[in-house]
Image (cartoon, grey):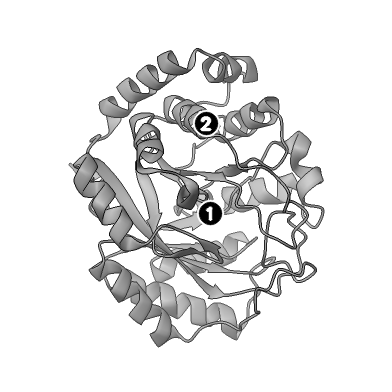
Amino acid sequence: MNPTLSKDAVREIYESPLLELIYRAATVHRQHHDPQEVQVCTLLSVKTGGCPEDCAYCPQAARYHTGVQAHKLMEVDEVLTAAQRAKDAGSTRFCMGAAWREVRDNRDFDKVLEMVKGVNQLDMEVCCTLGMLTETQAQKLKDAGLYAYNHNLDTSEEFYSDIISTRTYDDRLQTINHVQKVGISACSGGIIGMGESHDDRIGMLHTLAALPQAPESVPVNALVAVEGTPLEHQKRVSVWDMVRMIATARILMPKAMVRLSAGRVNMTMEEQALCFMAGANSIFAGEKLLTTPNPDVDADQEMFQTLNIRPRPAFKAQKLEAV
């Protein structure tokens, strides 16, 4: 969108009558995307658990007792095997997540750079989510062939400190800035259902859309309440709330990939279809999203056949820009 966008303008869209909102979002979606195409992404946890942060939703925080076993960084060949398997199953973007607070310049980071190079050679869009990073580290990832970097805002600036105290909202915005500065595509969205208000959801969407450069990818996650985390008793978020978030994101950021992310395992095919109608055009495939459950590949293939959806080819945005 643009930095002059007001929060009231976002609120006006978000609070419009739901069916009107879906219709408007679907119209915008068709102007910028093929409505029968959905990008299929795979997310692999390359380093699991033991994270020093205190994100209230996360089963990988070392301070919570969630049953997640901490594992050191995977070997490069293991990751490349998983990436090839994901490609064979239809994924065109492969995302690697490490439960770190920030990237450190050490052998583990060197190993991640090798993973990025290897996945890039498979002709897949390669994405990482590794925590905070400096501009120099972002440049190293770019040089290795990184296509996108995920760093979610999670929620509004006002509600943020209720969820996380181990880093600031500005820290998150700075990482997004570092990523975009070196020419890596930014992937940034948030989670709903953590106890935030509608105003917090509007605030998060406003922050994303008003960035000098809107993210290329906007994940919309429904909280998966995990036993042992501070949010374990949160109720499942309504599908209508997901649809409202997706539709508003689509209108505000028309060219972005809007990702129907965590929480999809609890949604019926009909509910997911509503999200696609409202402008979602990307999902994560595979049985796990880092450590939380996700629909299996067979269920997704059945949904694609029923809805007559086909996977979006890799690097399509770049190819369109080149024409």
Q: Locate residue 268 relative to residue 111 in the image: left or right.
A: left
**Residue 227 visible in this rendered orientation of the protein:** yes
At 56% from the left and 77% from the top, the residue drawn is 109
Callout 1, which amino acid? Val
On the image, numbered disc 2 is attached to which residue? 245
Callout 2, which amino acid? Met
Residue 188, how many percent across, how many down? 54, 46
Q: Locate residue 59 relative to residue 91 in the image: left or right.
A: right
At 73% from the left and 37% from the top, the residue drawn is 157
Residue 118, how many percent across, how many down? 35, 77
Quadrant in the picture for residue 5: top right
Label 2 and label 1: CA atoms lie apart by: 25 Å
On the image, numbered disc 1 is attached to which residue? 179
Q: Locate residue 189 relative to residue 279 in the image: left or right.
A: right
User: Which residue is more in the foreground, 271 or 221?
Assistant: 271
Q: Please determine whether, in this image, residue 179 is positioned above or below residue 141.
A: above
